[in-house]
Amino acid sequence: MSNGIGIDFGATAWRAAVFEDGRCRLAPETVSVPGERGVATTDPHRTMLRDPDNPHGGSVSRSLRLETVKANLGTGRRLRDVKGHIADTFETQALAQLRALRANLEEHLRAEIVGAAVGVPACYGMNQRAALRSVAETAGWGNVALIDESVAAAMSFYQNETEPRHVLVYCLGQSVFAASVLSVGGGQPQALDHEGSTQLGGQDFEAMLVQQVVRELLRSEKVDIRYNRSAIRELIERAEQVKIALSAASEVPLEVEYSEGLIGQAFHLELQVSRAVLEKLIAPLVAQTIALSRKAIQAASLRLEDIAEVLLVGKPTYTPLVVEEVRRAFGRQPRRADADAVACGAALYAASMYSCFVPRTGSRPAAEPMPLPREREEGPVAAMLGAGREKPVAPALPVGESEDALLTAVRRARQQLQTHGLEAGIEAFEDVLDQVREEISYLYSKRASELRQEGRLDEAQATLERGLRYWPENTHIRQLLADIHASKARELARRGFYAQSKGHLRKSLELDPANLSARELAQELERVLGGRGKRPQGRRPGR
């Protein structure tokens, strides 16, 4: 009998659900793995923080939360230390977390894990999906399937529904937003289209409140904390608490105590933040999510009247303004999925394909049951996978998930061509071409990274140069190639081959003018050579 493991790539922790004996059970909190400590991203869209415990004073986060990993995984963005050198990657962070989750879950189940399904944002590109799948497989999860979070939530929420209809899944996480149009009924959700952004989420709500408080402090108290990352970090943490509290209250106090050593003077911040103020600040961001939702409906060749229901997924959807704007935009009160719907839906999806774990000998404690209504436990999917069947009948896989991502994109492009004409078809197929180029560039960059870790810089350089021929404008490949040229330039300069070093340095800056390592080396060579391209002047050695 098939069993399944589903993983929810959440905002603060990796959570797992297990489908076995016809029921979906949530693994206990002790199995979940939260974000780990690490350096922060240089992404300009996200706030960088300073860790007071770091002896080097580097720009790091107090905790590299999973929302940051989730938004940057597979994008080519890297983690840097205070000197701008590469200190870690988001893929390495995710790898360590997934390994810990697998070890915890195997100990809990007393079983060997051979497969799992991972929920991912529907707006993830092919390179991000490939990066997550590669990390999960490297972490020892065996057969890894990816399923859109919106589809997973719908599989769990609508498994008892038999009437076919179109629904909009409004999935708002801490760092990612995705709006998906699905056809549900009979326990087989079909993904029709989606829109979204990995640079829009609940943490941006908090950032708007933080910016307002910083401006108010500067105006009324003449206290400037804009460049004090420790002070900003404390303010962000408090802003998150205030945002959550305002979901149930009309006004909440915001208090932060700053010591003299932190901002140069002792200061106690106490402000009353009203829900009206917060809603005014975040209204443009909520409007962006509504616009993306309308775009998804239009891309699916549907009208607003064709959407029978709106399903809310994610903790930030508890914000009253989000609920009100969704109701106003689509003319109906939205419904809300369970907090663990993504993990449970992913477990159902995994069980429909293969058994995900093989129990070891001996007894094992039962997983904590997920609080599902009785009628949902006895729905079509549970019935097909439940106990009493030696060979359970697997439900049809959701459209867009049973196929390869590239084939799904081609199908959507053909639909655009047939529905909206030649111009729309050309634009859609150009998007497919971009996805192919992204996939190729990811494979080249992954291979080059492996070669570089083995110390084979020349082969890594040749690999990246081949990848650059496929996509000359690819920023990620250009940055990786610039790093290799900068490394070679520094080694040659250390050995005294200044002319050759400057050649690699010039190539590095041509590929990536913002490469910090190359810029630092250029300044060092300028001081050493005096800007003349010659060896340092000094006493000529005796013959």
Image: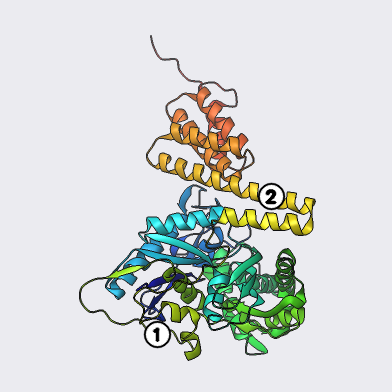
Q: Residue at x 57, y 27 (%)?
A: 530
Secondary structure beneath disc 1?
Answer: loop
- Depth check, mark 1 against mark 2: the one in front is 2
Type of amino acid under label 1: Pro
Nearest the eye: 470 or 66: 470
Crowding at dot 2, Cα within 10 Å, few <14 / some 14-19 / many 20+, comes out as: some
Q: Is residue 475 above or below residue 413?
A: above
Please indicate whether residue 412 sits to the left or right of residue 454 in the image.
Answer: right
Placement of 378 over or under 146, stated as above or below: below
The amino acid type found where label 2 is placed reads: Phe
Vertical side of 371 occupied by 264: above or below: above
**Dots 1, 2 in contact, CB < 8 A:** no
Q: Quadrant of the C terminus?
A: top left
Earlier along the polypeptide chain: callout 1 or callout 2? 1
Q: Identify the residue shown where x is 40% and y is 85%.
A: 369
- Does 514 sit above or below residue 129? above
Residue bearing mark 2: 429
Instruction: Count residues near mark 1 (Cα–Cα under 10 Å), then give few for <14, some for 14-19, many for 20+.
Output: some
SS for dot 2: helix
Whether residue 222 is visible here, answered yes or no, is: no
> Where does the image place residue 371, in percent across and percent down from the top left?
45, 87
Q: Nearer the viewer, residue 40 or 338?
A: 338
* Position of residue 507 measured from the top left corner of the image (x, y, whole percent): 58, 31
**Image quadrant occupied by the N terminus:** bottom left
Question: Which residue does the image show at 40% across and 63% down from the upper left?
Answer: 98
Q: CA distance from mark 1 to mark 2?
A: 45 Å
Q: Position of residue 467 (x, y in %)?
A: 55, 38
Instruction: Kindly indicate the quadrant of the structure image that contains residue 125.
Output: bottom right
Whether residue 480 is visible here, answered yes or no, is: yes
Q: Where does the image place residue 321, in percent across and percent down from the top left? A: 70, 81
Indicate the quadrant where residue 258 lies.
bottom right
Which residue matches tag 1? 369
